[in-house]
Image (cartoon, grey):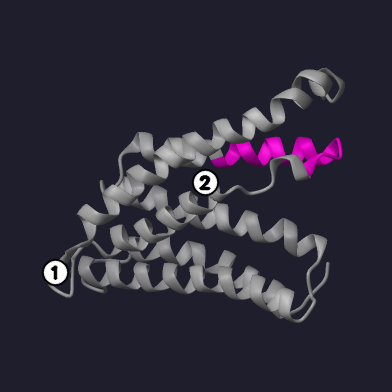
Amino acid sequence: MPFNIPILLTWLRVALIPLVVGVYYLPAHWLPRSDQDTAATLVFVVAAVTDWFDGFLARRWNQTSAFGAFLDPVADKLMVAGALLVLVHLDRVEHFIAFIIIGREIAISALREWMAQIGASRSVAVSSIGKIKTAAQMTAIPLLLWHDMLFRVVDTQRLGEYLMYLAAVLTVWSMFYYMRLAWPLIKEKGGMMDG
């Protein structure tokens, strides 16, 4: 396993995920709910920044690797899934929204793995729809974790909900987009990779 600063940052992101969840299990006399929200938001934002920074450094220092390419999206999906489960538990995100987003990530990850096995991974490269979806959900999650007025003007719960609904719509749209791209190969080779 290669070890460099970009991979260290990705591992840091993985390590931060339990903290987003864990702060809500601290006793209220240790950390009131508003402080839990603040702590979870800050941890999530730090994790999101490492997501951008590790990719930037890997390209800048020419330290890209197959392991890093594998670990980075896994860390991203764990981060989003963990945060969504917390938000569902706090009743700040609808169950079906979390199911759509997490279910899509599992389905597309499986599709990409299968496409890589048959040497056609470029057929399901990230689309602009997927990038907009990611931007919407990565903005929505810290807003929903914050769960308070921002600068006494922005209702973060309301704005976060709108962005999360947008992310859910784009999630379904992008899933159909990827499936449409992959469908000819699924029909052609779908029965050859069973097991």
36 left or right, relative to 12 = left
Residue occupying image coordinates x 38% and y 73%: 42
Q: Element at badge 1?
A: loop
Residue at mark 2:
129
Amino acid under disc 2: Ile
Name which quarter of the figure residue 26 lies in.
Answer: bottom left
Q: Element at badge 2?
A: helix
Crowding at dot 2, Cα within 10 Å, few <14 / some 14-19 / many 20+, comes out as some
Residue at mark 1:
153
Closer to the camera in the image, 120 or 145: 120
Residue occupying image coordinates x 64% and y 54%: 74
Residue 77 horizontal/vertical position (percent): 56, 52
Residue 60 horizontal/vertical position (percent): 72, 80
Q: In the rendered image, which quarter contains the N terminus?
A: bottom right
Magenta residues? 105-121
Sequence-first disc among 2 and 1 = 2
100 left or right, relative to 194 = left
Dot in front, 2 or 1 = 2
Q: Is residue 35 visible?
A: yes
Residue 2 horizontal/vertical position (percent): 82, 71
Q: Is residue 138 above or below residue 52?
A: above
Residue 130 horizontal/vertical position (percent): 54, 48
Closer to the camera in the image, 106 or 133: 133
Q: Which mark is residue 185?
A: none
